[in-house]
C-alpha cells in the first residue's frame, strides 16, 4: 500500500506498556504492525477503543519511545528533528491556552514550528478563514465552543504548511456543517500533495474521504485496503419504480431471493444475469424503473463484522 513516494512506514512494530509495581509482561498495545503510506493519500486508521491507534500515532510522532520493530517518517526515524518540522498534529482532546486568543494561538504554534512571526501572520488569516474562525479569532479560547476549539486545532495543525498531518478525531464535537467543512479542507490538502493520517471513530466520515484504510484490533491489523475493497457488494439490488406493483412476487418468480417490497420500492438478491432478466420483466410489464442501485456493505458494517469475528 502506498503512493509513488513512501511518507511513513512501519515493519513489525510492537509496543508493550509495563503495568503494576512488579513489572511483568504488561499490556501489549501493538503486536507487529506493518504499514506503508504514500504521498498525497488520505489514510484512515480505524479500531475500537484500546486497539492501539493512538499509541501508533504517538510512536510516529516520537511521543512514545522504547518500541520494538521499525518505524520511519520521510525515510528517517521519528526522533529525527527535521521530520517533525514537516508534520502537523491535531491530538484528540487537545488543550490550547485558554487565556490566549485564537489569533495568538496561531502565532504561538507557527513560531514553535520554527517560522518567523511575520510569515506566520501572513498565513494565519487565510487558514482561519478556511476553517470558519477568522471572525472569532480575537476572542479568548475559553469563550469557544467545543466545535470552535476543534476548528482552531485544525488550523494550528496547518499553520506551517506541513507535508504530513495527523488528525486524531478531527470532527469530534463539530456540528454537521463544520464536519462538512473539515472534510472539504482535508480533500483540498490531499489535492495540494499533503498526506493526511486520520484516526477516527466516525466511520461514515472516513468512508467519504479516505483513499486507504487499515482496521486494527488488539494491536494487530485485521484488514487493509481501499474503501471499495472494504465495502464489497452484498448481492442485494434496490429498485424504485414509478408504480406500486401488486403482482411483484408472481412477476419475478424464479429470480433471485429475499424479495422485500415497500410500496414502489423493493430489494432483491440477484446475480448479474438475474438482474438483467429482472429489468426485462419489469419493462415488459410496463413498469417504469426510476432507480437501480446495488447495495454494498457500509464501512461500519464491515468494521463490526471484522472485530466481532476477531473476538470469537
Image: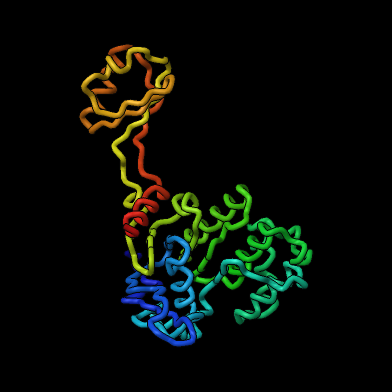
Determine the residue positioned at 76% across, 66% down.
Answer: 142
- Which color scheme did the rendering employ for the protein? rainbow
Closer to the camera in the image, 118 or 25:
25
Total numbered labels placed on residues in the image: 0
Q: Is residue 9 above or below residue 195?
A: below
- Quadrant in which the C terminus appears: bottom left
Tell me: residue 54, above or below residue 249.
below
Left-right relation of 139 to 52: right
Which residue does the image show at 44% across and 51% down from the upper left? 207
Picture coordinates of residue 75 (x, y %)?
38, 79
Q: Position of residue 300 (x, y in %)?
A: 42, 49
* Quarter of the rendering containing residue 250: top left
- Residue at position x 48%, y 70% in the image: 54
Quadrant in which the N terminus appears: bottom left
User: Where is residue 290 drawn, in percent x and y?
Assistant: 41, 23
Task: Tell which residue pokes out farthest to the bottom in this image.
Answer: 22
Q: Position of residue 37 (x, y in %)?
A: 38, 67
Q: Is residue 229 above or below residue 284?
A: below
Amino acid at each position: 500500500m502506498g503512493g509513488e513516494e513512501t511518507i511513513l512506514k512501519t515493519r513489525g512494530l510492537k509496543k508493550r506498556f509495563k503495568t503494576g509495581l512488579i513489572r511483568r509482561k504488561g499490556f501489549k498495545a501493538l503486536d507487529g504492525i506493518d504499514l506503508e503510506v504514500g504521498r498525497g493519500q488520505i489514510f484512515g486508521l480505524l479500531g475500537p477503543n484500546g486497539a492501539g491507534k493512538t499509541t501508533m500515532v504517538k510512536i510516529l510522532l516520537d511521543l512514545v519511545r522504547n518500541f520494538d520493530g521499525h518505524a520511519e517518517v520521510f525515510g528517517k526515524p521519528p526522533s529525527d528533528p527535521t521530520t517533525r518540522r514537516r508534520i502537523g498534529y491535531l491530538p484528540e482532546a487537545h488543550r490550547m491556552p485558554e487565556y490566549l486568543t485564537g489569533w495568538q494561538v496561531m502565532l504561538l504554534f507557527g513560531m514553535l514550528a520554527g517560522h518567523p512571526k511575520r510569515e506566520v501572520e501572513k498565513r494565519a488569516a487565510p487558514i482561519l478563514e478556511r476553517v470558519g474562525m477568522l471572525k472569532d479569532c480575537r476572542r479568548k479560547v475559553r469563550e469557544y465552543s467545543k466545535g470552535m476549539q476543534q476548528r482552531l486545532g485544525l488550523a494550528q495543525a496547518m499553520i506551517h504548511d506541513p507535508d504530513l498531518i495527523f488528525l486524531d478525531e478531527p470532527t469530534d464535537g463539530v456540528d454537521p456543517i463544520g464536519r462538512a467543512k473539515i472534510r472539504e479542507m482535508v480533500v483540498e490538502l490531499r489535492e495540494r500533495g499533503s498526506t493526511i493520517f486520520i484516526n477516527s471513530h466516525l466511520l461514515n466520515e472516513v468512508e467519504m474521504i479516505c483513499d486507504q484504510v487499515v482496521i486494527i484490533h488488539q494491536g494487530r491489523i485485521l484488514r487493509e485496503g481501499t474503501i471499495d475493497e472494504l465495502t464489497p457488494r452484498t448481492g442485494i439490488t434496490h429498485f424504485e419504480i414509478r408504480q406500486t406493483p401488486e403482482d411483484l412476487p408472481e412477476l419475478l418468480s424464479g429470480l433471485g431471493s429475499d424479495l422485500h417490497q415497500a410500496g414502489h420500492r423493493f430489494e432483491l438478491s440477484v446475480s448479474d444475469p438475474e438482474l438483467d432478466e429482472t429489468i426485462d420483466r419489469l419493462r415488459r410489464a410496463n413498469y417504469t424503473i426510476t432507480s437501480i442501485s446495488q447495495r454494498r456493505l457500509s464501512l461500519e458494517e464491515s468494521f463490526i463484522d471484522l472485530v466481532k469475528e476477531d473476538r470469537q
